[in-house]
Image: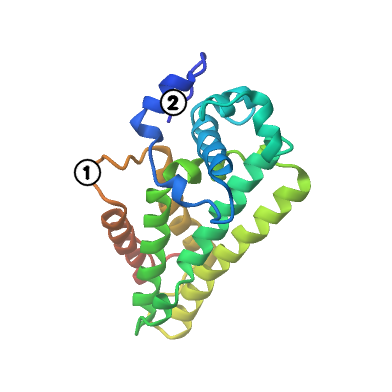
Amino acid sequence: MPRRQSRFTPEEIAADPRLQDHSPELWDLGLGDVEKGLLTSAVRCFAANGYHATTTRDIAAGVGLSPAALYVHFPSKELVLFEIMRTAHERALVYVKDPSVDEAASAAGRLAAIVSRHTAWHARYHVAARVSQYELAGLTPGHYDEIIQVRHQTNDVFRATVEQGMAEGAFAPGDVNRLVRGMLSLSIDLVRWYRLDGPDSPEQLGDFYAGLALRMVMNKCS
């Protein structure tokens, strides 16, 4: 969602349909309800106002707690951001690497499944995904490196699938890196504008983008 000069208030954030997604389902089962609530509040605050403009008071207010309560569960705001990003990136990678993808009989089927699942995941969790994609600068160098490693693993899944399709002659020869960047951009850029109450479900959008990805590899791309 677009940023504005004045900050969104906790009340506006709670009522904004653009900030409603399935992010509360992401958090580790081992976390307590308060920790999950703080992460959900932080996701919405970071998405609305940006990481640096969000205060610990904002995050705590989203679950009706005092600012000091956040530090009982997370020693710093940066650790809240890291937990959000770590969880989101790892969950997305697991979803893309689902065993059902390997069951596809053809290279085209495997690529379509990967793109469809990657797109649908980012649509379903678009608020958490938006934070994960656009607030990387808020991480410490060590945490940044950890997240980048997971991103590389996701990129490798796409790259290996495209390379295999080309080697089998199923896809036209082309620049693999450019093709993969294009596919990832399709799946990720939607977090800027997608709404769950919009005309396309996550699965419908995933299937549509899968079709676009197949057109990219069926035509010669230099």
Residue 171 at least partly seen: no
Q: Amino acid at mark 2?
A: Ile
Residue 54 located left or right of residue 106: right
Q: Which residue is disc 2 drawn over?
A: 13
Question: Above or below — where is 153 with respect to 89?
Answer: below
In the rendered image, the residue lying farthest to the left is: 199
Q: Is residue 132 above or below residue 118?
A: above
Secondary-structure class at tag 1: loop
- Residue at the limit of the structure toward the top, as seen here: 6
Q: Quadrant of residue 133?
A: top right
- Image quadrant in which you'd find residue 39: top right
User: Is 163 rendered above or below residue 205?
Assistant: below
* Image quadrant occupied by the N terminus: top left
Locate residue 148, reporting x and y percent. 66, 55
Residue at 36%, 56% in the rendered image: 120
On screen, residue 210 versus residue 64, left or right, reads left
Q: What residue is disc 1 on? A: 199
Quarter of the view holding residue 69 = top right
Residue 142 visible, this orientation: yes
On the picture, is 44 further left or further right than 75? left
